[in-house]
Amino acid sequence: MGLAVPAALWGLTALVALVLLSFWRLRPARLPVPSVLLWKLLPDRVPPVRALRRPRASMSLLVQMLAVAAGVLALAKPYTEEQATKPRTVAIVVDLSARMLPRLDAAKDAYAQVRAALAPGDRVVTYTFPPVARHEGAFAWGVAHAAGDASIAIGLARREADIVVFIGDRPVDAPCEQVLVGGPMANTGVVDASLDGGRVYARILGPEGERVAEFAPAPEIRVADDAFALDDVLYLDRGKGTVDVLLAGRPHAEIRRALERHPRVRLVTGGRADVVVRVGEPARADDPPSRVVVHLEGEGFVPKTVATAHGLMNGVAASEVVLARAATISGDGEALLFADGRKVAVVRGREILIAAEIERAGWPAFPSFPIFWSNVIDFFSSDEWLVRRTFAPVGLADGRTVRAERVGENRFGADIVHANLLERRASDLAGESRPFDPSRLPSAVVESRRRDLSRWPAVLALLLVLTAWWLERKP
């Protein structure tokens, strides 16, 4: 035990002053006189009252002296020293990737062992991934349907923690204590898939290695049934796929703008395209079967009236189709547009021919123009089987872009999107096992602490002052 401010003990000299003041009686004693006749017995000259008197034992004086002593002791700040472990901040990084699903119970046990090995005063924070999240209390033990990277979570944990403990199924290249709950576990699952020629080609990961299997398209293709169910089923959806469009010939800003606004159109500048749109020149032999040719040969004529005559013109008002010039198209083909009773646009299989000049001040100035091109894209894009990955962007029919975060069914309002894991890292269950050893944790630092005791004499001094005041007020 010691005193933090020993110089405060000089305050005990106040006890001497208190004793000296007790010799001086400021309050005169009162003596009741039963009759005024007794005043005659008093001498003419009354000797003065002597204030300085010999002190006598007084409870009030004793209490006052104790109050002063307790107050001085409080100002000296007494303390005791004790040995205690220094509190530490411990960060536990837990891998909640998809492949941890069959090892979740082992990870929970390891987490409980780490917490039990810490000192009572240690502060614990938990980081989970993917995605990286920080927790100071309880957290959900659900796995994410993707593979994660531990480096980001461990880097954040090292910034605030004295000790970092990683719990996962495989070692990480980072300076931290690692508790591994992996080990040999056979798994068979789909890690990639593609569609070509009406067939599904799935790359399957198994104990024997990787292989490619061929399947007929179906909403669900089951490849295995094991401890890791997230990659055992390949889900396919039917929908409108993306249409790669190549713009060729004379540049036409209005046609480009109308196509760019379509959610399923992807404009390409070369290579293989699903659809070619040629403006101002005839079709070529190397064009794909799906093409739109906007080309006027010869002088043509200036149409006075225009009439629509095909499903591609649904939503298109004939009064808004204003053509600068047009030419008659002979031969077979379903009529698309009539100008002055002549066939000026036709559909021949997967080919659309428009023998007209589309000027900026004419048809493109009306809402019917982008409606027509939207119908054209819908005409060229047929329902097809789609393979979607988790966390990959998906375009819905209403123009929204969403991400399917769960394997299997994902609901976005009235729309349903099925997604697959399709990632080798998420399906690879090969890992290592390394049990938790408390001796590998750094030992807690033992430090000397001072326990302040000044509040107790301060409280005692206050109680003694109140007692002295009560004694003085007592008759």
Image (tube, grey):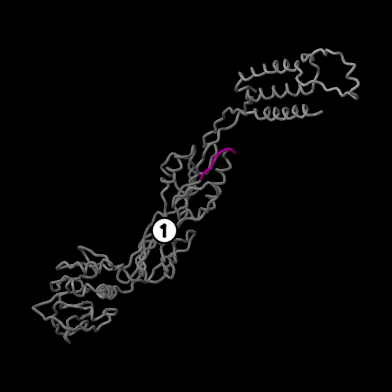
Crowd band around label 1 with a 10 angstrom C-alpha radius: few (<14), some (14–19), many (20+): some
Which is more toward the observer, 411 or 386?
411
235, 259: nearer the viewer: 259
Of residues 227 and 282, the one nearer the viewer is: 282
In the rendered view, would you say 320 is above or below 418? below
Number of numbered tags placed on the structure image: 1
Mark 1 lies on residue:
206
Taking the image as shown, residue 149 lies to the left or right of residue 455, namely left
Q: What stretch is highlighted in magenta?
A: 120-125
Label 1 sits on a secondary structure element that is strand
Q: Residue at x 79, y 13 (%)?
A: 48
Q: Where, quadrant-wise, is the C terminus in this rendering?
A: top right
Residue 370 in picture, x, y percent from top left: 26, 72
Residue drawn at the location 20% of the way across and 74% of the way down: 292
Q: Taking 93 as reference, is 191 above or below it?
A: below
Image quadrant holding the N terminus, namely top right
**In terms of image quadrants, where is residue 463?**
top right
Q: Would residue 371 be counted in the magenta stretch?
A: no
- Residue under the point 52% across and 39% down: 89
Residue 324, above or below 160: below
Task: Tell me residue 146's x, y (percent).
Answer: 42, 56
**In the figure, is residue 261 to the left or right of 251?**
right
Quadrant in which residue 284 is drawn:
bottom left
**What amino acid is at disc 1?**
Gly
Q: In this view, does 440 lie above or below 269?
A: above
Q: Position of residue 311 (x, y in %)?
A: 28, 81
